[in-house]
Amino acid sequence: MEAYAVVQTGGKQYRVQAGDVLEVERLDGDVGAKVTLSSVMAMSNGSELVVGAPEIDGAAVVAEILEQFRGKKVVAFKKKKRKGYHRKVGHRQELTKLKVEAIDG
């Protein structure tokens, strides 16, 4: 089994391995820049699992920013029958595509 880590960013947790590409809520930085995700909840070296309480001190995941983009539109539509009430609101989330390069810990 390969080494992996569970990191938290944007209020969500992701299980990542070296070489993984993932989409997270927008992080500051230009395309090609390196980002360090220091909020590591759990980490495995392939044979042993270390779980933080709530985070592991000194552990980090290094990733490269591949792209800054906007996600698909999500439409929230409310309606009350026979009352003439309807509301339509759209939202597009700002996202960052990351490629995990290394798990340090």
Image: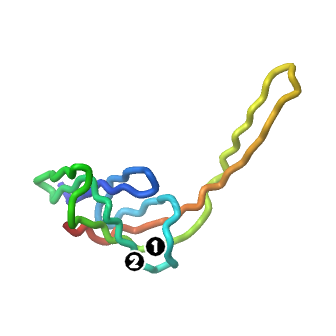
Task: Name the kind of residue labelled 2 in the image.
Answer: Lys
Please give the name of the residue rendered at 77% of the width and 41% of the height, measured from the top-left corner: 88
How packed mark 2 is, by other alpha carbons closer than 10 Å (few <14, some 14-19, many 20 or more), is: some
Q: Quadrant of the C terminus?
A: bottom left
Residue at 62%, 61% in the rendered image:
70
Question: With respect to residue 20, does 49 lie above or below?
Answer: above
In x, y percent, where is residue 96?
51, 65
> CB atoms at circles 2 and 1 under 8 Å apart?
yes
The residue identified by callout 1 is 65
**Lower sequence index among marks 2 and 1:** 2
Indicate which disc residue 92 carries. Answer: none
Helix, strand or loop at disc 2? strand
Secondary structure under the numbered disc 1 in the rendered image: strand
Instruction: Tell me the distance, in whole angstroms, between the alpha carbons under discs 2 and 1.
Output: 6 Å
Label 1 crowd (10 A; few <14 / some 14-19 / many >=20): many
Q: Residue farthest to the left?
A: 47
Quadrant of res 86: top right
